[in-house]
Image (cartoon, rainbow, N blue to C red):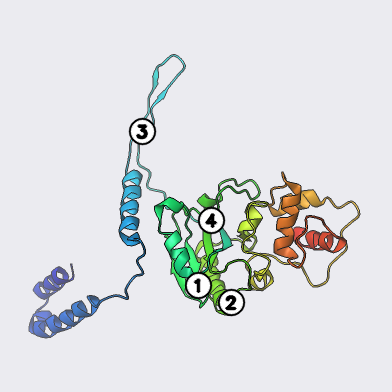
């Protein structure tokens, strides 16, 4: 393409023809520079080849233009036709779900996410030293949330980005990885206009089933940077008639298992005590957080 473009310019201008040798040298330098070897990509379990194959399969599906086949109760076919619209794009993520890997190393996690039999994945993995592994295009659906619910959303995988933090769930997170995480969240929030309230944890959307990213996760630090909410330093007493169940639902928690929902809330917003009972302090925190939604 570049060569053809230069040839057209040469034919149209005597100026270019006079200096053609010099432009060819410049073009050669550009071409050589563009062909430099890129930084090697981490490949685990032949993941690059499988990734490309599956992308091609999805593209084939997206290109299908067959119309729907509908029949009425009498078996009469309903007329239908495929007419291509010109107004569309890819679905965009509206939530970020944060996890801890519950494994011993980032190497182990990368291996887990590149094995078909595990049926689990994430868009990003943040290692202990702060290195970020991008494992799936943001517009594609990762398998990280599992059976979950937040508000009225029952398929969190279809509307969220999953981020795994290299941590076994039994120890504090490293400063380097939290620093990288905050930079990553800032990029995602700006790119997809993700609301502040929509940065949550796996335990929030799967109460009773998941506890990640654990009570060690610095949600307060994230909230100070605009990712999720946290209670104010000065708390107003919750009213005597405060409906804490309704408040949990407003925030997004699934209260069908009320004790699990309370524990999930406390795991995120209290952390020092994750028992399924609400103390007066817990109620005050809940009331304060609830008013932010």
Q: Secondary structure at mark 3?
A: loop
Q: CA distance from mark 1 to mark 4?
A: 21 Å
- Circle 4 sits in a helix, a strand or a loop, which is it? strand
Q: Residue at x 36, y 64 (%)?
A: 44
Residue position marked by numbered label 4 in the rendering:
160
Residue at figure coordinates x 66%, y 56% from the top left: 204
Distance, label 2 to label 1, CA atoms, is: 9 Å
Mark 2: which secondary structure? loop
Circle 2 is placed at which residue position? 174
Of the residues under marks 3 and 4, which one precedes in the sequence?
A: 3
Q: Which residue is mark 3?
A: 67
Marks 3/1: CA–CA distance: 46 Å
Q: Nearer the viewer, mark 1 or mark 4?
A: 1
Horizontal placement of 71 versus 32: left or right? Answer: right
Disc number lying in front (3 or 2): 2
Say which label, 3 or 1, has the lower sequence index: 3
Residue at (52% x, 55% y) in the render = 144
Q: Which residue is mark 1?
A: 127
| Tally of numbered tags | 4
Q: Is residue 85 above or below residue 137?
A: above
């Amino acid at each position: 393409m570049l060569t053809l473009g230069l040839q057209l310019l040469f034919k149209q201008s005597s100026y270019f023809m006079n200096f053609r040798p010099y432009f060819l040298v410049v073009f050669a330098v550009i071409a050589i520079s563009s062909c430099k070897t890129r930084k090697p990509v981490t490949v685990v379990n032949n993941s690059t080849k499988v990734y490309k194959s599956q992308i091609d399969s999805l593209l084939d599906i997206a290109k299908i233009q067959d119309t729907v086949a509908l029949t009425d109760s009498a078996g009469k076919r309903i007329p239908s036709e495929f007419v291509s619209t010109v107004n569309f794009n890819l679905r965009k993520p509206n939530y970020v779900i944060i996890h801890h890997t519950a494994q011993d190393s980032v190497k182990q996690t990368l291996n887990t996410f590149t094995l078909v039999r595990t049926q689990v994945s994430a868009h990003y993995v943040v290692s202990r030293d702060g290195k970020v592994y991008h494992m799936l295009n943001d517009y594609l659906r990762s398998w990280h949330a599992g059976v979950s619910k937040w508000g009225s959303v029952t398929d969190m995988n279809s509307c969220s980005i999953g981020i795994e933090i290299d941590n076994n769930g039994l120890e504090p997170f490293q400063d380097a990885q939290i620093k990288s995480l905050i930079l990553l969240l800032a990029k995602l929030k700006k790119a997809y206009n993700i609301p502040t309230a929509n940065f949550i944890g796996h335990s929030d959307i799967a109460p009773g089933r998941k506890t990640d990213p654990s009570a060690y996760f610095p949600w307060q630090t994230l909230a100070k940077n605009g990712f999720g909410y946290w209670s104010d330093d000065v708390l107003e007493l919750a009213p005597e008639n405060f409906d804490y169940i309704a408040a949990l639902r407003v925030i997004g928690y699934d209260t069908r298992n009320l004790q699990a929902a309370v524990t999930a809330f406390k795991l995120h917003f209290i952390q020092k005590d994750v028992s399924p009972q609400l103390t007066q302090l817990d109620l005050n925190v809940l009331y304060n957080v609830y008013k932010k939604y």
